[in-house]
Image (cartoon, rainbow, N blue to C red):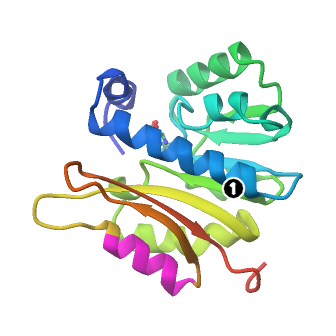
Amino acid sequence: MGRDWVGWHAGYDVTESSLARRLVVVRQYLSSALASAAAPVRLLSICAGEGRDVLPVLAAQDGGRDVPAVLVELSPVLAARARSTAAGLDLPRVEVRAADAGATATYAGLEPADILLACGVFGNVSHEDMCRTVAALPALTKPGATVIWTRGRRDDADPSREVRSQFRAEGYTELAFCAPGDARFRVGMSRRPETGRP
Ligand SMILES: C[S@@+](CC[C@H](N)C(=O)[O-])C[C@H]1O[C@@H](n2cnc3c(N)ncnc32)[C@H](O)[C@@H]1O
């Protein structure tokens, strides 16, 4: 991922941009996942960016401040922004790891998550790496965990189909899927099976 990810986040500030609209959906999905998860809840966001999808939701949700949340973000600039936002929102249980989300060492010592966000990830890796990532999620989550993910469509194809199909192949149940006709973003929310690999 060699892009300007700091600049990419400016898209969130453009009213009615696809990214701003996507953010609304991701926050809604996260809010509903938090509301329906049995306490204690642990959250993990991979390639978390500034944490715009996670941090305001934790601050607004009943019990959200008690949720231990780990945000993994490679860019030190974006990780510092996420830390600063978490401090400003009084979220002391948020930990931001400025580290490679693709390296297993990054997750050392972490309890498995009840809710995992993989937003802005699958469009930036190959099809094979998307499949590998979905297959690896049980190493990071509890059985029954909720995964919220995004994928953009192109003019000629909608690769979110492949992501949905990969989650299905891994035994996940789709809880929600949003694919507006007038925008390129897609957001999915899938539940890991209760049984299967630890
Ligand atoms: C498309 S943005 C998504 C950010 C956030 N999840 C969101 O949806 O707002 C992709 C993010 O992944 C980060 N990133 C890229 N490679 C990474 C890696 N190997 N490990 C962790 N983060 C990475 C980038 O710095 C960027 O912030």
- In this rendering, the answer to whether 85 lies above or below 11 is above
Vertical relation: 100 (above or below) 92 = below
The magenta stretch spans residue 169: yes
Which residue is drawn at the image coordinates 35% and 53% (left, top)? 124
Asked if residue 188 lies left or right of residue 13, the reply is right
Q: Quadrant of the C terminus?
A: bottom right
Q: Which residue is mark 1?
A: 115
State the image coordinates of residue 146 (x, y, percent, origin top left): 65, 63
Q: Amino acid at mark 1?
A: Ile
Q: Look at 44% across and 38% down and name the residue there.
A: 23
Q: Is residue 51 left or right of residue 114?
A: left
Q: Is residue 57 above or below residue 101?
A: above
Question: Quick one: SS at disc 1?
Answer: strand
Task: Please tell me how many numbered marks the rendered image carries.
Answer: 1
Question: Start and end of the magenta stretch?
Answer: 161-170
Secondary structure character of the magenta stretch overall = helix
123 vs 114, left or right, is: left
Location of residue 71 (image quadrant): top right
Residue 171 within the magenta-colored segment of the rendering? no
